[in-house]
Amino acid sequence: MKRQRLKIVVRGAVQGVGFRPFVYRLATELDLKGWVINSAQGVFLEIEGAPDATAEFARRLHTNKPTRAIIQSCESSHLETVGYKEFEIRESTDAGGKTALILPDIAPCADCLSEMIDPRDRRFRYPFTNCTNCGPRFSIIEALPYDRTNTSMKQFAMCADCEREYRDPADRRFHAEPIACPRCGPQLQYWDSLGKSLANSEAALQQAFDEIRAGKIVALKGVGGFQLLVDARNADAVRLLRARKHRQEKPFAVMFPSIEQIHAQCEVSALEERLLVSPEAPIVLLRKSTTGSQSSAAAPGNPNLGVMLPSSPLHHLLLRQLNFPVVATSGNLSEEPICIDESEAIERLRGIADGLLVHNRPIVRHVDDSILRVLHGREMMLRRARGYAPLPVTLERSLPAILAVGAHLKNSVALSVGRNVFVSQHIGDLATRQAYDAFTQSAADLPRLYDAEPELIAHDLHPEYLSTKHALQQPARAVAVQHHWAHIASCMAENEIEPPLLGVAWDGTGYGVDGTTWGGEFFLVEKNSCRRVAHFRTFRLPGGDAAVREPRRSSLGMLYEIFGEELCERKEWRAHFLAGEVKTLRRMLTRAVNSPLTSSVGRLFDGVAALAGLRSHSTFEGQAAMELEFAVDCATTESYPFLLKLGSPLVIDWEPALRALLDDRNQQVPTGQIAARFHNMLAEVIVALARHCGQTRVALSGGCFQNRYLTERVIDELSAVGFQPFWPQRIPPNDGGISLGQIYLATSPLRELT
Ligand code: ZN
Ligand code: ZN
Ligand code: FE
């Protein structure tokens, strides 16, 4: 059995409680090699050994830990094996430097939860209870050092009891900065949709409970912003929320009162369960079970469901009483950032929420719920925010202060301080005013928090991205980083891999150095250079950006690329267009106006989904590609043919695949087989390119690798023939990971593609 190496960073009350000897005993018992070290940044450890043993170690790290140890955050990544010979406790150093860490917001600990349900406790049913081991952090911090006066709790004067706990070194709340109780801390109110207060404290909670049970939509001021809650079992109520939020089909996440109720609706692996109950309390994408009775309204036509457990004392109180799952989605109109302030909520959620459950603890910055999935037995971050941001990625080398402003969609920003790269919380698509404001705030916020003055500001190569324009207005020197190269660099940074390697970056869209739209790219990364060695055959997208919402346009562009003027004699387009529409679009194509060339695999997915008869219009980005993934018939092992056209760069020609697909459609081959053949072809393309380039290591990144079937197949096929695949784990493969890649390359001689 192949060995595995797992790196784990544990933060919390783990120092001075016998944690290192515990790790040593556990590792030796399981015959694992590696090391453990204490640092100002937490306990870092690496284990290497049989996969079963590493998994068992990761499990027992939580279940068997010393009684006084409390884990607030635990991040693990699989790394390339190095062949450790023994397990050692290493001398404490300052890995990552002495930079103060800001912890993420953490779900309530077991002690706080038990006090909250104890009628004799003075914090009985108090929704803002917390201690040194749990509670809000990043969402309430205004500045460092982390003192109460530097948080949004400064407006609450501690009562004598809280003050005593806060000063007592033996107390669980010794220096718990957000310490609070019903006498001195924040309070709940229930408001009608116009902002009129209807009830206070316990009565407010009761009213929210009644409204949700009656099928109403309640906006709840959570940890990092407003969420909209509605009874997940009530299909009409969920539909109403969709209509009001202008979110037709995009899946909603569901919050369950207990892990048992999740088990009743979804398939949950041991790792998925551990993630759900973790202090980070993220949304985990699970497969719906066939026996579950879950209403399909939350995630229509989707075999998966994003689920989470209560992540704050307030959520615990509410969900415990409801005892049924609720849809919990960001309090915003689609595509806008989550709103954090009551008066803003009244304005922006008018017409969406029937009432608001609010409180008077200000939220300093918005932090959405994080989203993870398990892929190939490992975590994959899809949206990094609450519970994880702003924990750093620690690099092997020290960097000057660099600010990276990320991409345009799923924006995040990042800042390097020494060896640490602090990646901001998910900010979102910079298409709206609100999102742009949130972006400029975060870009100013990170350097201010860490007292850094960026020498360099790294941005995308796309001249029209608002993030690029913002970067160019700053006093620091600006450096441009190509989008797909940044995707690969992000994957290299977190997987701690050095060249040489083959980078495979597939996504929807990104600006290429030749001015065309890239998205199906292969990079040969060597010690001193990075070269785009291959890409997919390009085709025109009639209408440009409009194609993102209309997969049928991608299909038309693909057909035009192959059949040219004979296009109109083909019948494939008739299912999707009126004759008049084709006339206009054909004119765009023949004259090459407003129809940019693209090598995007994301658009190829769209085109194939349209040709397979799945979808001609999308209501959200990536919908058609997702449906093509869900359609895959796993029993189909064959794949479509493709050609490699040698040259520099080499071109992957999908024409044979398209022709075979059209034949399949003519012969009424089931969609599941068509979808599978297309996915299988893509996996074969990667293996063929890895062979062609003679690189053992292959780094995969870009939004396309959120596709579980594709990514698992690529990993399996590469591994089966001796290649070593790497893929994103802690940092998203989508554009949320771009900022890390920009930082990684900003000062590197590899930055410019050759
Ligand atoms: Zn606690
Ligand atoms: Zn108090
Ligand atoms: Fe991208």
Image (cartoon, rainbow, N blue to C red):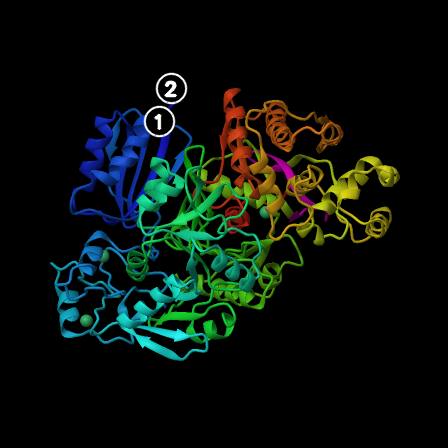
The residue that disc 1 covers is 51
Magenta-drawn segment: 510-531
Mark 2 and mark 1: span between their CA atoms?
8 Å
Q: Amino acid at mark 1?
A: Pro
Q: How many numbered circles are shown?
A: 2
Tell me the quarter of the image containing the C terminus. Answer: top right
Mark 1 element type: helix
In this picture, is 693 found above or below 44?
A: above
Snapshot quadrant of residue 206: bottom left
Residue 356: x and y in percent read 40, 70
Which amino acid lies under the numbered mark 2 shown in the image of this protein? Answer: Met
**140 sits left or right of 352 in the view:** left
Q: Decide: marks 2, 1 in contact (CB < 8 A)?
A: yes
Is residue 384 rendered magenta in the image? no
The N terminus lies in quadrant: top left
Query: What residue sits 39% from the left and 43% below the top?
Result: 265
Picture residue at 34% right of the left edge, 51% below the top: 309
Question: Quick check: can you spot residue 754?
Answer: no
Residue 216, numbered circle = none
The residue under the point 26% across, 26% down is 86
Residue 210 drawn above or below residue 709: below
Query: Mark 2 highlights which residue?
Result: 1
Residue, x 19% and y 64% (percent of image)? Answer: 124
Horizontal and vertical percent position of residue 599: 70, 41
Residue 405 sits in quarter: bottom right
Q: Residues within 10 Å of mark 2 (few under 14, many from 20)?
A: few
- When asked about the image quadrant of residue 183, the answer is bottom left
In screen coordinates, is 14 left or right of 191? Answer: left
Relative to 52, is 497 above or below? below
Identify the secondary structure beneath mark 2: loop
Label located before the other in sequence (2 or 1): 2
Q: Quadrant of ligand 2?
A: bottom left
